[in-house]
Amino acid sequence: MARALQLTEQLMAEPSVTPSDGRCQALIAARLQPLGFSCETLVSGPDDFRVTNLWAIRRSAHPNAPTLVFAGHTDVVPTGPLENWSSDPFVPTHRDGKLYGRGASDMKSSLAAMVVAVEEYLAQYPEPDISIAFLLTSDEEGPALDGTVVVCNTLRERGERLDWCIVGEPTSVERTGDMIKNGRRGTLSGKLTVKGIQAHIAYPHLGRNPIHDLAPALAELVAMRWDEGNAYFPPTSWQVSNIHAGTGASNIIPGSCVVDFNFRFCTESSVESLKSRLTAVLDRHPIDYALQWTLGGMPFLTEPADLVGAVQQAIRDETGLETQLSTTGGTSDGRFIAQVCPQVIELGPPNATIHKIDEHVATQDIETLKNIYRRVLEQLNLRAQALAA
């Protein structure tokens, strides 16, 4: 059995539903330490939600060597109804050239491919011109309050230099390497509470309907064009996710209406501009309201340079594909890493079955991904040599 596939199965056999890590990070640290990595476990979070993080680094002997970080998460989402799975989600199972189980694509195959790629690379180049690190967490699929963001803050406080980062999120569509993420949109959520006066619905003059008050402003917000996007990002979007009002009775004017909404915003808009434009709309209408904001993450973008070029070349050499750069999809821990690392991309296997019943990955994709990661190491080491010359 190929070593990357074998490690993938070992990781998948650990039932590491957020915030549990199972023994995944210990298994990975046991592979890294013999290679010269210094491994540090950082535990964070309250007693009922303890998060395990791993920071591991192998420093180059060359002064001022740049650092490549492999980043990812060992936690997985819940399985859903076990009876709907074709096989036990935590017993890696092979069918028709595919490996089934929770975490197969998201993202234990990526982690295994990263580790084995580094093993193979260091066996061939034992004294590289780059430092290599791993940043892993068990809190990516959850609230993400005690995971990667905690490690990044710690590294910032220490003055740790990070130059390039590859996050192993499943980014591919049809074939491994056909798409990478070189950025992600930011996410800004809001809870709008519109106050009214509850009354009997037959006597509307004795009440004030907050839904009616809100409707004109809501229509204006739905029609707004927040920005035009740019060469890398689609335009910023604003979507309502929930509207709550009333008691459930059909003869009562509600006393309040609560609207949950979310911006997925690009680098053409700022948090401040989105907030001010939305409140300006509300203020133009005769409504009594309160707003609560939650910033889930800032947008980040890695324009084509050393890292993107190395990844593109590695994918081309391994698969013949010309990879597509994309910033679509949800958020990832890349948003935290981008605050301490200037170049961040995401590269992983196809994502068609992530979070689904019978999640799976083609076994060949694991080997392909491992080879791409190894080639990226080779490409970046060549760039480091050229810079040092």
Image (cartoon, rainbow, N blue to C red):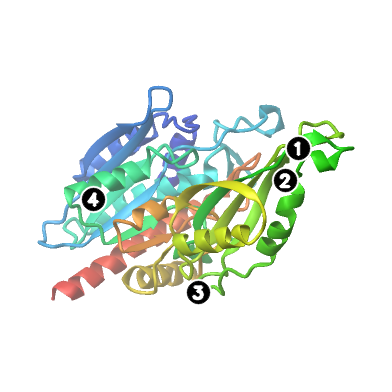
Hey, what amino acid is under mark 2?
A: Pro
Q: Which residue is mark 3?
A: 322
Q: Residue at the spot x=11%, y=57% of the render?
A: 61
**Mark 3 vs mark 1: which is more N-terminal?**
1
Q: In this image, 215 relative to 151: left or right? A: right
What is the secondary structure assignment of the residue under circle 1? loop
**Residue 254 bears which disc, if any?**
1
Alpha carbon distance from label 3 to label 1? 56 Å
Mark 4, residue position: 156
The nearer-to-camera label among 4 and 1 is 1
Q: Are marks 3 and 1 in contact (CB under 8 Å)?
A: no
Number of the front mark, 3 or 1: 1
Q: CA distance from mark 3 to mark 2?
A: 53 Å
In the rendered view of the protein, which quadrant contains the N terminus?
A: top left
Distance (Cα) linking label 2 and label 1: 7 Å
Callout 1 amino acid: Pro
Q: Is residue 353 visible?
A: no
Q: Mark 4 near mark 2, Cβ–Cβ under 8 Å?
A: no
Q: Which residue is mark 2?
A: 210
Q: Is residue 62 left or right of residue 261?
A: left
Q: Nearer the viewer, residue 349 or 302?
A: 302
- Quick check: marks 2 and 1 in contact, CB under 8 Å? yes
Residue with the most extreme front position: 206
Q: Could you say whether the residue bearing mark 2 is in a helix, strand or loop? A: helix
Q: CA distance from mark 3 to mark 4?
A: 35 Å
Could you give the CA–CA distance between mark 4 and mark 1, rounded to whole angstroms?
49 Å
From the image, state whether disc 4 or disc 2 is nearer to you.
2
Q: Residues within 10 Å of mark 3 (few under 14, many from 20)?
A: some
